[in-house]
Amino acid sequence: MKTFSKNQLERYPFYLKYFKELQKEGVETISSPKIAKVLGYSEEQIRKDLQAISNEPGRPKKGRSVEKLIDTLETFLGYRDTTTAVIIGCGHLGQALLNYPNFQEMGLAVVGGFDTNPDLIGKEINGKSIHAMSELGEVALAQKVKVAIITVPAQYAQEAIDEAVQAGIHGIWNFAPTHVTVPYHIVIENFNFSSSLAVLIHRLYDGR
Amino acid sequence: MKTFSKNQLERYPFYLKYFKELQKEGVETISSPKIAKVLGYSEEQIRKDLQAISNEPGRPKKGRSVEKLIDTLETFLGYRDTTTAVIIGCGHLGQALLNYPNFQEMGLAVVGGFDTNPDLIGKEINGKSIHAMSELGEVALAQKVKVAIITVPAQYAQEAIDEAVQAGIHGIWNFAPTHVTVPYHIVIENFNFSSSLAVLIHRLYDGR
């Protein structure tokens, strides 16, 4: 089986966005040099990236079919499937995510939120109910929840993740800015302000 | 000058978080094998990462001083300096970031928000005013703004970034889920749900 680096996986949604823009403009084929110019990746990297998810070679003169590329990318990224998710922690960030309009097109169906705050429990945000944490196991089982999005304050992240794992949820998308541990069979992706900010600030002051 | 990969830069905040936890527990020294066990990086990687920002070698028996590591990391990450930032786009996500309590300790001072919505302009969130976009140049100059955090809808991202660049802001932290372009002297870091989700979903269904 092919293996994909984290950096490589992170590039695919950018290809998809760009190809969808092209499709909207009526463009039917695209070449690696053109993609390189717009997205800023090297031509070699682009060929490698696209080859890794498609069997169809680019034709040097005509380029690749935009429609087929979109099809391949959407399938590869799971946008054609539905992955059920819940949000644990319905403060500012959790509520912003309950309202976020683009998860659906990415194949992520957020079915509800969870919190321990009695003022929030029972509320509806964007048509999604906020449940008590004690109902997590029940909801996860009934709705076949695959992903828990963790938006609790840092000090509660480990506890929230432990409860998600106990509820049978296998994918953790951790927005809490802290280090956490999970059992080996659990998939965790940290979506971390501080890591992204570290890259920005370092580049901004590079050479100071 | 040393160069740092994106992955490497992204790891440093995790080291810092962990060392701060150790400090809170009264732990004075730490060894690479122990760090490896907790953070899940290889010992070799840890030695390389820490060596790259510090001149002090780890002593095989005693390990490294936690206090000195924290000092080195905070300085390297710019947490001891102040970088002034504004938020462009004060919808759900922008407001969540105006309320986010941890930017200050990362050296990022968010001084205000900007929006085009008349219902939002003039409002205060977490003590920070929301200004009209037309005031961006003036505020950026007066407050020496270094970073614009872009939280507008995808279709307005390029326009918002162009205005930030025109206002003399050199660092763009783009939260909008779309591809954008900036002049070569501008530093941009994309903080992108879809890229992070791509990594999670791929790992979750790996081998399907």
Image (cartoon, coloured by chain):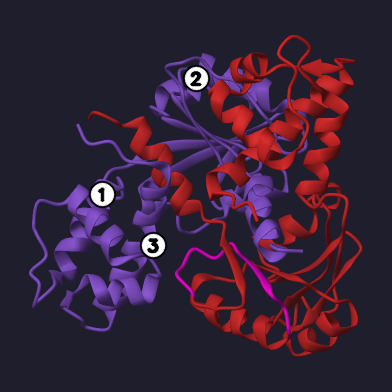
Chain colours: A red, B purple
Q: Tell me where the magenta segment starts and ends, as one range.
A: A168-180
The first of marks 2 and 1 along the sequence is 1
Q: Residues within 10 Å of mark 2 (few under 14, many from 20)?
A: few
Inspect the image, locate mark 3, and give the three-letter code of the amino acid beneath it: Phe
Q: Mark 1 to mark 3: distance in Å?
A: 17 Å
Q: Which chain hosts label 3?
A: B
Position of residue B20 in the picture relative to residue A197 (left or right): left
- What distance separates the C-alpha of mark 2 from that of mark 3? 36 Å
**SS at mark 2 in the image:** helix
Residue assigned mark 1: B80
Tell me the amino acid under the disc marked 1: Arg
Q: Quadrant of residue A12?
A: top right
Residue extending farthest to the top is: A61
Q: If you read the primary sequence from the N terminus, does the residue marked by circle 1 or circle 3 appear first?
A: 3
Q: Earlier in the sequence, mark 2 or mark 3?
A: 3
- Which residue in the structure is indicated by mark 2? B138
